[in-house]
Image (cartoon, rainbow, N blue to C red):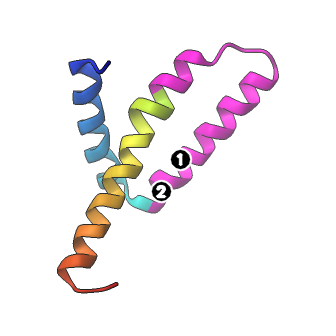
């Protein structure tokens, strides 16, 4: 299921995403997605890149940024 190392990595990746910023993290995620797509197109096995970069690093960044933004908008009563 989930390993403790993956949960810890996801937590710190979320903090990293907040430090970088939401827009920049979203752009980096798109670049990584394009890189993985291009590498798969030329025949490179990208299972490790897809798991390590997309799922364990950048996805928690995006989710954490969205959660922080939602909390801030709730506190300011912005809908």
Q: Which quadrant does the C terminus fall into?
A: bottom left
Q: Which residue is mark 2?
A: 24
Give how far across and how far down residue 25 sits, in percent. Answer: 45, 52
Compared with residue 15, is residue 74 higher up or lower down, i.e. above or below? below
Q: CA distance from mark 2 to mark 1?
A: 6 Å
Residue drawn 67% across and 34% down? 35
Q: Residues within 10 Å of mark 1 (few under 14, many from 20)?
A: few
* Label 2: how many Cα within 10 Å (few below 14, some 14–19, many 20+): few
Which residue is located at x 25 percent, y 37 percent? 12
Spot occupied by residue 44 in the image (x, y as percentages of width and height): 72, 15
User: Which of the 4 image quadrants contains residue 55?
Assistant: top left
Q: Is residue 74 above or below residue 34?
A: below
Secondary structure at badge 2 equals helix
Q: Is residue 25 shown in magenta?
A: yes
> Percent x, y for residue 61?
37, 46
Name the residue carrying label 1: 28
Left or right, 53 with respect to 6, comes to: right
Q: Nearer the viewer, residue 28 or 45?
A: 45
Q: Which residues are magenta?
A: 23-52
Residue at 37% x, 50% y: name it.
Answer: 63
User: Is residue 30 found left or right of 42 in the rendered image?
Assistant: left
Q: Quadrant of the N terminus?
A: top left
Q: In the rendered image, which quarter is residue 21 located in? A: bottom left
Q: Are marks 2 and 1 in contact (CB under 8 Å)?
A: yes
């Amino acid at each position: 299921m989930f390993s403790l190392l993956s949960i810890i990595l996801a937590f710190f990746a979320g903090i990293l995403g907040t430090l970088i910023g939401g827009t920049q993290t979203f752009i980096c995620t798109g670049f990584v997605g394009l890189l993985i797509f291009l590498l798969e197109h030329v025949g490179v096995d990208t299972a490790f890149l897809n798991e390590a970069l997309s799922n364990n690093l950048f996805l928690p960044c995006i989710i954490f940024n969205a959660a922080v933004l939602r909390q801030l908008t709730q506190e300011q009563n912005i809908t």
